[in-house]
Image (tube, helix red, strand yellow):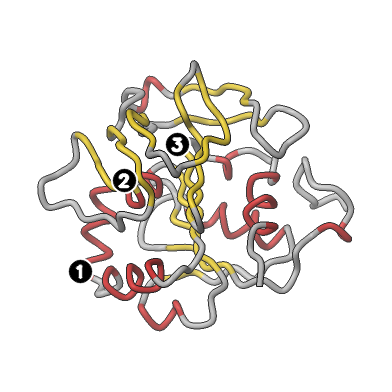
């Protein structure tokens, strides 16, 4: 159909019926919601602990990781969300979402909190500031054609744990990785019309 995002086949391949929340405290959450809904998922915005009920998965969007950390705490959402994630709620974190999921964060604030979900060391804004943003085509495991990735104040992965699967690299550095129920990207997959990474995440949500 005309409103179908590029990179998606006919609607028979879409994983409908999934409810994937999108953390909506700050950052580029609404475009993630649009991508998920275009793929047939229900994508409620998550702002309170009550919004976590009934979710099959959650997306942690790009934005400003220290601001997100503070808002997660002041909203009372942090502990409830961390508990759900530890219990196995699948998560797709992009840019700031990668930082929130990593076990080790360099150049963060001393009071910055994260979910410690995936064995990574990442450096905040490791690719530079806003003026250093760039776009590049990536070879991604599971995709037949390159994915056009947008990097904006992106975290730089300095270490990957032994149980972490690297799905894509840029100049030899991991930029898309997965471990258990946690998938994280250093870039913004929602900022192009290509919804294949969101599709891969939906396809990973097994009963």
In the rendered structure, find residue 175 and report the number of the disc placed on it: none
Q: Residue at x 38, y 49 (%)?
A: 118
Q: Check the image and report above or below for 138 versus 180.
A: above
Which of the numbered marks, if any, corresponds to residue 186?
A: 3
What is the C-alpha distance between the residues marked 2 and 1?
15 Å
Q: Quadrant of residue 36?
A: bottom right
Q: Kindly check if marks 2 and 1 are in contact, taking CB atoms under 8 A apart as contact.
A: no
- Please, what secondary structure does the residue beneath circle 1 have? helix
Q: Which residue is mark 2?
A: 64
Dot 2, crowdedness within 10 Å: few (<14), some or many (≥20)?
A: some
Q: Position of residue 109 (x, y in %)?
A: 14, 44
Disc 3/disc 2 C-alpha distance (Å): 13 Å
Task: Specify which label sits upstream in the sequence, 2 or 1.
Answer: 2
Q: Nearer the viewer, residue 143 or 60?
A: 143
Residue at image coords 41%, 72%? 87
SS state under label 2? loop
Q: Which mark lies nearer to you, 1 or 3?
A: 3
Question: Disc 1 or 3, which lies upstream in sequence?
Answer: 1
Residue that appears at 10% across and 46% down? 110
Q: Is residue 168 left or right of residue 172?
A: right
Q: Is residue 159 above or below residue 136?
A: below
Q: Which residue is mark 1?
A: 74
| Label 3, residues with CA under 10 Å away: few <14, some 14-19, many ≥20 | many
Q: Position of residue 55 (x, y in %)?
A: 53, 75
């Amino acid at each position: 159909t005309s409103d179908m995002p590029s990179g998606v086949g006919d609607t028979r391949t879409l994983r409908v019926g999934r409810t994937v929340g999108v953390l909506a405290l700050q950052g580029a959450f609404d475009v993630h919601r649009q991508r998920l809904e275009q793929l047939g998922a229900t994508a409620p915005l998550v702002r309170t602990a009550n919004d976590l009920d009934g979710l099959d998965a959650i997306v942690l969007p790009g934005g400003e990781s220290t601001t997100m950390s503070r808002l997660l705490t002041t909203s009372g959402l942090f502990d409830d969300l961390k508990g759900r994630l530890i219990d196995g709620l699948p998560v797709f974190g992009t840019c700031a979402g990668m930082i929130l999921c990593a076990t080790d964060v360099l150049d963060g604030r001393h009071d910055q909190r994260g979910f410690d979900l995936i064995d990574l060391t990442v450096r905040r804004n490791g690719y530079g500031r806003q003026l250093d943003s760039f776009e590049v085509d990536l070879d991604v495991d599971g995709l037949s054609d390159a994915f056009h990735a947008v990097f904006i104040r992106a975290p730089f992965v300095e270490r990957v744990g032994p149980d972490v699967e690297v799905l894509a690299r840029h100049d030899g550095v991991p930029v898309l990785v997965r471990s258990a129920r946690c998938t994280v990207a250093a870039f913004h997959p929602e900022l192009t019309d290509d919804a294949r990474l969101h599709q891969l995440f939906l396809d990973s949500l097994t009963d």
